[in-house]
Amino acid sequence: MTDENTERKGPLTDIRMIELGQLIAGPFCGQLFADMGADVIKVEPPGTGDPMRVWGRGDYPLWWRVCARNKRVVTANLREPEGQALVRRLIAEADVVLENFRPGTMERWGLSYEELSKDNPGLIMVRVSGYGQTGPYAKRAGYAAIGEAMGGMRYLCGEPDRQPSRAGLSIGDTLAATYATVGALAALHHREKTGEGQVIDASIYESVLNVMEATIPEYTVSNYIRERSGSTLPGVSPSNIYDCSDGIFLIAANQDTVFKRLTAAMGQPELAEDPRFDSHTSRGANMQELDDIINAWTKTKTVEEVEALMQEAGVPAGKIYRAPEMLDDPHFEARDSIVDTPTDDWPDLKMQNIFPKMSKTQGEIRWTGNTTLGAHNDEVYREVLGLSDEELERLRSASII
């Protein structure tokens, strides 16, 4: 599983991507390409590398092991003309170049799309940024938190009686990277038909905006502004987290037929005929009252007892998982949702598998993120650019790589 010499697998084994940038918004796109078999060559600044190398929680920084998996890592000093020229040569041999610097940075380094496409007319350039490549905010610094706020997600997260919360994950970054991936794959399809390359402009705020459901139409038609609603969705009931005698449990039974099955399992079938709860609209209008009734019932039982009753009745329901519950769940195990990725440092290291599953061209985790900065310098620069040992040593001595 962690042998760098094994053959790449997946639908993109004929694609080479040069990954520039750092942190999450760009590199997660690179991770998705590498997961699907592309030859992703990640370029980092010599001496420091991507800050993700030291990110993570717990006793050790392990995030890098996930986000840099299956990537070859090289170093090049993009602030020096010789480093820029070196990377330009790499990009000339690639299908896709990915960057998530502040707009204008690539142009300042002489690596604009106009320049790069002179060497590689079919090149696809993926650009991930906070606000996009155009518009009055384009050159502002933009992290995921700002994009989530501007895109409307942050306002809706959390309890209504306090300040907006965050999701607990860098969702804006990963959304932007996912849309960047979709754009890049569509551009590859277009190039296959026409030979034309193009630029993919994926902003964080618009990626968040794109998953905001009907918030804009609702406002334009009804002047309705959605507000924070905590663990519930207004008008959708029952769909909440309920207290059991030994923990918490999620039940989602808002559809009429499912609600009838829930009330039967509770031993209170009359609730389904009660005018307060006999329709989607009435249940939504009396959400708190209904939640109190269900919560009073779940409190008399353990999580396992409620889960068994819900499964028997065919009611969508489930436990609130953390990492320990995921690792202990037979469904995760049966589908290889989490896989062993042993390394020299961590013989029992596990991480999420490659998704989605593909029946013909499934990718695999060949190795986790390589912790040695510039680990593939000699391999890549010899293989792709044909550099000699003498040239490589000179570049090292000059701090270009």
Image (tube, rainbow, N blue to C red):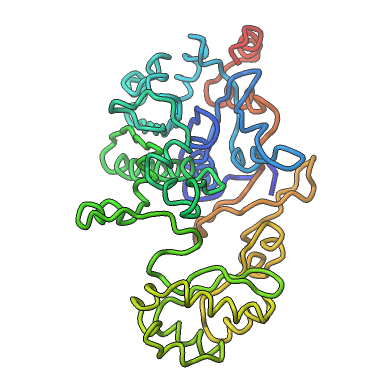
Give the residue drawn at x 44%, y 36%: 146
Q: Nearer the viewer, residue 239 or 344?
A: 239
Residue 287 found in image quarter: bottom left
Give the residue drawn at x 30%, y 56%: 214
Q: Quadrant of the C terminus?
A: top right
Residue 137 found in image quarter: top left
Give the residue drawn at x 42%, y 47%: 155
Residue 183 found in image quarter: top left
Residue 131 x, y percent position in the rendering: 36, 32
Q: Is residue 321 visible in the rendered structure shown here?
A: yes
Q: Nearer the viewer, residue 158 or 27?
A: 158
Give the residue drawn at x 40%, y 82%: 277
Residue 334 x, y percent position in the rendering: 64, 68
| Position of 214 relative to 367 (above/below) | below
- 262 lies left or right of 304: left
Residue 217 x, y percent position in the rendering: 24, 54
| Position of 3 relative to 98 (above/below) | below
Q: Residue furthest left?
A: 221
Residue 186 x, y percent position in the rendering: 34, 45
Q: Nearer the viewer, residue 75 or 161?
A: 161
